[in-house]
Image (cartoon, grey):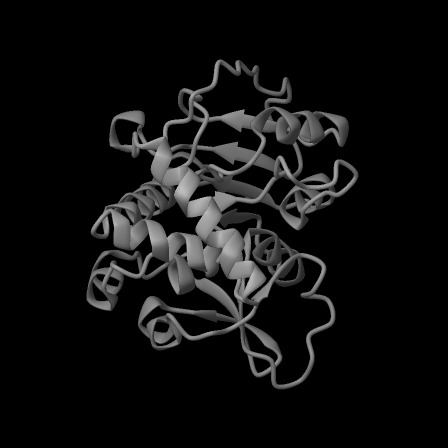
């Protein structure tokens, strides 16, 4: 099937997962998308791992149409969706998604949400990230008429189990162009310590003030504080979702 993967999570976000484990476990038929020397390239895991943990920029949906010559970059979920549009792929698999942050302006829409409202590519993601305002984010999906489906039960949170009584119904569209599909980290495997989440967000905000990117810094913080557990559950679920898609949507165009 026509499936590719974003590269920010594997490139920046799961430092304790070794290159050897990535190569051993990743299916050879699923390419990873990134920008090499100003062009979108599809790599095997063996070809990709030398770029891990390099301080490369993260390209989103808006940036992929006009890539400066000589650029090297990882692709976010939305960036991979734009790459999929250009290359003729029908599915993208990603880890955590950006949404509407509680402290963000209410009239701004992050690139991941924008792509879901404008792309014909289907996205299978784990969940929206833990620091996202879930109610506002799903409300934005409904406003922009972006279909979303939960492939298993919905419990708010990404690597954490959030304290939330938010209840959501899936979009009514059974089959449609584009759209978001969510298959989460099992609740029993998520981190329960929400004080750690608060410390991680504060750490990320401080990193931004120092000119560093938020999400790689926060992922590194959680990785260190959990002795690599946060990285492992993200990779395990990403890999599980790739296999789920290959088994259940074999005939998707």
Residue 209, position as x, y percentages in the image: 57, 61
Q: Please give left or right for residue 2 compared with residue 70 in the image.
A: left
Can you give x and y, in whole percent of width and height, for residue 203 in the image? 44, 52
Image quadrant where residue 188 sits: top left
Confirm whether residue 245 shows in the render.
Answer: no
Q: Is residue 64 left or right of residue 233?
A: right
Pick the residue in front: 31 or 108: 108
Residue furthest bottom in the image: 70
156 above or below 48?
above
Residue 159: percent from the left, percent from the top?
A: 36, 38
Where 232 sits versus 168, above or below? below
Number of numbered discs on residues? 0
- The reply to whether residue 188 is in sight is yes
Instruction: Please state if 20 lies on the left or on the right of 111 as rendered.
Output: left
- Residue 78, given in percent of the width and then of the height, sits at 61, 52
- Residue located 52% across and 33% down the image: 181
Q: Which of 248 and 121 lies nearest the eye of the viewer? A: 121
Tell me which residue sits at (76%, 32%) in the image.
Answer: 144
- The residue depicted at 23 percent of the width and 64 percent of the height is 18
Horizontal arrangement in the rendering, residue 104 relative to residue 74 (left or right)? right
Question: Seen from this angle, which residue lies furthest right?
Answer: 107
Question: Where the C terminus falls, by quadrant?
Answer: top right
């Amino acid at each position: 099937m026509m499936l590719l993967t974003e590269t920010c999570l594997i490139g920046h976000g799961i430092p304790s997962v070794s290159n050897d484990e990535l190569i051993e476990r990743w299916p050879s038929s699923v390419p990873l998308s990134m920008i090499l020397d100003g062009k979108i390239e599809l790599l095997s895991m063996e070809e990709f791992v030398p770029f891990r943990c390099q301080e490369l920029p993260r390209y989103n949906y808006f940036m992929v149409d006009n890539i400066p010559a000589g650029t090297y970059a990882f692709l976010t979920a939305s960036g991979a969706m734009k790459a999929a549009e250009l290359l003729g792929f029908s599915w993208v698999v990603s880890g955590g998604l950006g949404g509407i942050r509680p402290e963000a302006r209410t009239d701004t829409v992050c690139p991941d949400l924008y792509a879901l409202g404008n792309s014909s590519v289907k996205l299978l993601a784990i969940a929206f990230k833990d620091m996202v305002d879930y109610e506002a984010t799903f409300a934005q999906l409904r406003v922009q008429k972006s279909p979303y489906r939960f492939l298993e039960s919905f419990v708010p949170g990404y690597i954490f189990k959030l304290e939330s009584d938010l209840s959501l119904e899936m979009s009514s569209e059974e089959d449609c162009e584009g759209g978001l599909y969510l298959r989460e980290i099992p609740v029993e495997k998520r981190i329960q310590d929400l004080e750690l989440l608060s410390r991680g967000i504060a750490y990320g905000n401080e990193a931004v003030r120092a000119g560093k990117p938020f999400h790689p810094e926060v992922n590194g913080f959680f990785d260190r504080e959990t002795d690599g557990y946060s990285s492992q559950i993200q990779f395990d679920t990403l890999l599980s979702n790739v296999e789920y898609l290959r088994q259940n949507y074999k005939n998707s165009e």
